[in-house]
Amino acid sequence: MSLIRQSLPALLREADRVLEGRRQAATAPVVLWPHIGENDADYHARLAIIRKRLGRSVPLIVACGPYAGDRLPNVTYVEFPPRLLPLLNPANPARYRVAYSGRGAAKSWSFARALILRALTEPVRVLCAREYQGSIAESVHKLLSTQIEELRLDPWFTVQRDSISSFQCAEFLFTGLHANVAKVKSTENVAIAWVEEAERVSDESWQVLIPTIRKPGSEVWCTFNPDAETDPTFRRFVTSPPPGALVEFVSWRDNPWLPPELDAERRYLESVDADAAAWIWEGRCRSASSAQIFAGKYSIEEFEPGDWDGPYLGADWGFASDPTVLVKCWITDRRLYVEHEAHGVGIDIDRTPDLFDQVPDARRHTMRADSARPETISYMQRNGYPNIVGVEKWSGSVEDGIAFMRQFEKIIVHPRCSHVVEEMRLYSYKRDRLTGDIRPEPVDAFNHTIDAIRYALGPLIRSPNMGIFTLYKQQFEALKRKEISA
């Protein structure tokens, strides 16, 4: 009886919360956007009048820029960076709404918020797409659901594992373009298609998607970080934007809420690699450079391992702001395949096993890790990773590892390994400060997953009898033995 009496208040509070949520859901909110050309003072005066006329029972949701004034009761302020507010305002008619930038510009969560507000006012069907999506975890589902929760709009939304819907019968769908051409073509009645990480979208995928979004008044939304000027997305929306396109370039300077941690990363990168900072933070297109270590050596492709050599697993430990990473790779047909990665910044040692569990079957296989942290290796051995060992290092091991990796005909990176892809682009040799000449030492930056790959392949790199051509010879002889036995 004591337990029942103690839990009764909690049960009543929970019942009140559920009833309040149902009451709110039964009352459709009013969503307010600025008029075109309306200044902030007039807009906020207008919303005060509307708030008074609506009465207390009707929720008011207001789209606005950063708001520092006194907040009215029973008003939800949904704030946007000032440069993105006009772009996303439905009062501005557009077939295409495009934002491109470097890192830290808040464009993805701004687009998510705008779509959430649309879903509160009309039964829109929203297709959330990207070029590669192996699972719902790789989509913007988490971003949308987090924004719904943070804005306290839960009463009007139903969030399920693979979809999100609103009380207005709006619906969010999630798909990858590359592997789902037939599914995309058959998707009907889409009012808005939002393509995130659109720098990766091929011209073929655009040619499939855009004609599919054909409902009267339908729109295509696009967010991306530029890579090369020759990429299909950059050419389509920046070099030669189509009629009816609103295109906005933004940067970290346009984000009033840029976290200090991100700003510290930006300033550090500017100090060690101005070219990389211009691409990552300033949103400038990256030109090919002879200093790039893996330029022309890698590609991004989906694959499934077969009867291949491996897997080879390598781990690099985080120091301060550096990430802790794990990679899983394979070798076949003179190619190196990077299948999975786990990546986290600020990971405490007791959370590292959970991080590494993101890589399938990581506990089953031998894993080679940076031997500079024997205490971390010992902890991992005691906590579910008995097969982890420290990798051997030697003078010149970094250069030897790079040379070994470059001997492969190609390095194939699965698109889910986004940090490996980024480092393959950015890992570079040093340049002489005065002459610009390339020096033979790599820059000690953008190398965490690269180091992990080197550790994974450590025994192959180190053994004088296991050069890559010796490895190829062994593979060829094994293949011949298989054919003879068959």
Image (cartoon, grey):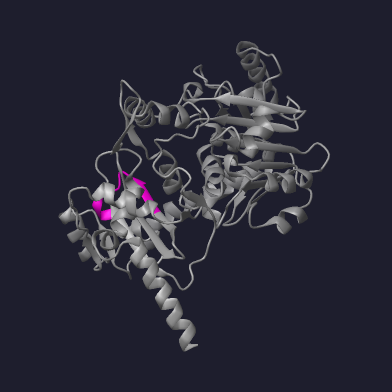
- Name the residue at 39% across, 35% down: 291
Give the residue furthest to the bottom: 485
Image quadrant in which you'd find residue 2: bottom left
| Viewer-side residue, 304 vs 460 | 460
| Viewer-side residue, 156 vs 106 | 106
Which x, y percent locates residue 121?
Answer: 71, 37
Magenta residues (range)? 342-351
**Seen in the image, is 392 located left or right of residue 406?**
left
- Name the residue at 24% across, 43% down: 319
**Seen in the image, is 392 located left or right of residue 192?**
left
Q: Quadrant of the N terminus?
A: bottom left
Image quadrant in which you'd find residue 239: top right
Which x, y percent locates residue 452?
Answer: 32, 53
Which x, y percent locates residue 197?
Answer: 56, 41
Is any part of residue 413 visible from this angle?
Answer: yes
- Name the residue at 51% across, 27% down: 284
Instruction: Decide: is 40 above or below 7.
Output: above
Which x, y percent locates residue 310?
Answer: 38, 68
Instruction: Decide: is 177 above or below 89.
Output: below
Image quadrant in which you'd find residue 80: top right
Q: How many marks?
A: 0
**Seen in the image, is 113 located left or right of residue 429?**
right
Query: Is residue 40 one of those drawn in magenta?
Result: no
Is any part of residue 258 visible from this angle?
Answer: no
